[in-house]
Amino acid sequence: MFQALRREVLLVAVASLYLWAFVVDRDGAGRALASGGRVFLSVVLIIVSVFGILGLFQVWVDKKKVATHLGERAGLGTILLGAAFGTVLVGPVYVIFPLLFAIRAHGARWAVVTAILTAWAVKIPMVPLEVQFLGWRFALARTVLTFIGAVIMGFLVEWLMALGSRSKGEPGAARVN
Amino acid sequence: MVALVAAGYGFTRYRSRAKTNQAVTVARKSLLAMLPTFAAVFGLVGLFQVFVPPSLVERWLGAGGGPFSLLVGATVGSVAAGPPAGAFPIAGSLIEAGAWMPAVAAFIVSWVLVGVVSLPFEGRVFGWRYALTRNGMSFLLAMLIGLAMGWLV
């Protein structure tokens, strides 16, 4: 039971807030609940669609093949490919990180790994949700900027890692700083 | 939107029935797994709309703050514990309450890229040097992207 609570920290926190709210301002708390519910209903179809897309991606994009491919090459093209791959990645942190670690173990440069991780902020499957809440101009701008940022971050972090480090970002140093 | 996704599924069903069923299962399971989080996030949105005075948002995340608002946005995002999908509804509420758009953009980018909560895990997988470097740079990137958003949008 405690395990479940630990996992859903956010829900527990929000539930506690509501408890406090009910004590302090019963009417307000009720309104808050209703308001949240209304917003949810307004986007429920989009959420369902988003997960539909997620399912399709999960099954049809072969992560292993991409991982191997990204690990074996090392040019600008690979970094761009990595960033593109990152934008469509979906999953919790504890799934993404091991995947990236596997890519790194296959020999990928820090630049590639960082580009993927940063591009992960784009979350293409979630874009419909972003558009719904923030408008398509915002979503488009953020997507483009993040993609560019991913490539820059790739080079930047790799360079920083190479400073004062003997490994110089060489592959095969996956376990060493 | 739903029509598009349904069409997509119809197409893949034609290509491979087994894989399509698998996709549906994955979709359903992921959705169910996320429901507690969505409940929390939309609950938070509701609380926000009723209890957070716009003046508070204006003070910490308002346009008048400029770089300070960016910093606050990026900081709040970095300590967020939860799936990135949760950032969007909250961001929408922030904007509605009068937050500066760049600060909200920094908030979203930071939520996804900088994880104070996930730092230990990242450190264990990639090494602490990488984890700290990447998170630090991402924090700056979040603010930069926020700034750029201000020019573009």
Image (cartoon, rainbow, N blue to C red):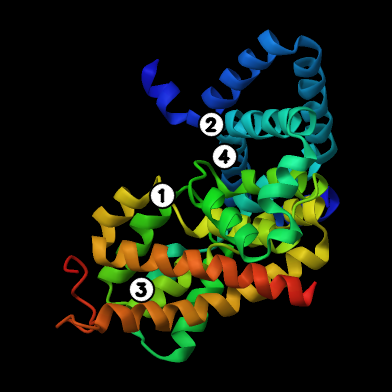
Tag 4–tag 1 contact (CB < 8 Å)? no
Q: Quadrant of the N terminus of chain A?
A: top left
Q: Secondary structure at mark 2?
A: helix
Which residue is identified by label 4?
A: B30
Amino acid type at mark 1: Val
Q: Say yes or no: labels 3 and 2 on the same chain.
A: yes
**Which of the chains bears the disc numbered 3?**
A
**Which of the chains bears the disc numbered 4?**
B
Amino acid type at mark 2: Leu
On screen, A154 above or below B31?
Answer: below
Q: Say which mark, if any, is on residue A26.
A: none
Which residue is identified by label 3?
A: A68
> Relative to the observer, which residue lies in front, A40 or A66?
A40
Which circle, 3 or 1, is nearer the viewer? 1
Amino acid type at mark 3: Thr
* x, y percent for residue B43: 69, 28
Which residue is identified by label 1?
A: B116
Q: Secondary structure at mark 3?
A: helix
Q: Residues within 10 Å of mark 2 (few under 14, many from 20)?
A: many
Q: Residues within 10 Å of mark 3 (few under 14, many from 20)?
A: some
Q: Quadrant of residue A43?
A: top right
Which residue is identified by label 2?
A: A10
Q: Is residue B33 visible to the viewer in this orientation of the structure?
A: yes
Residue under the point 37% across and 56% down = A97
Residue under the point 49% across and 64% down = B139
Q: Say yes or no: labels 4 and 3 on the same chain.
A: no
Tag 3–tag 2 contact (CB < 8 Å)? no
Q: Residues within 10 Å of mark 1 (few under 14, many from 20)?
A: some
Q: Is residue B15 visible to the viewer in this orientation of the structure?
A: no
Q: CA distance from mark 4 to mark 3?
A: 26 Å
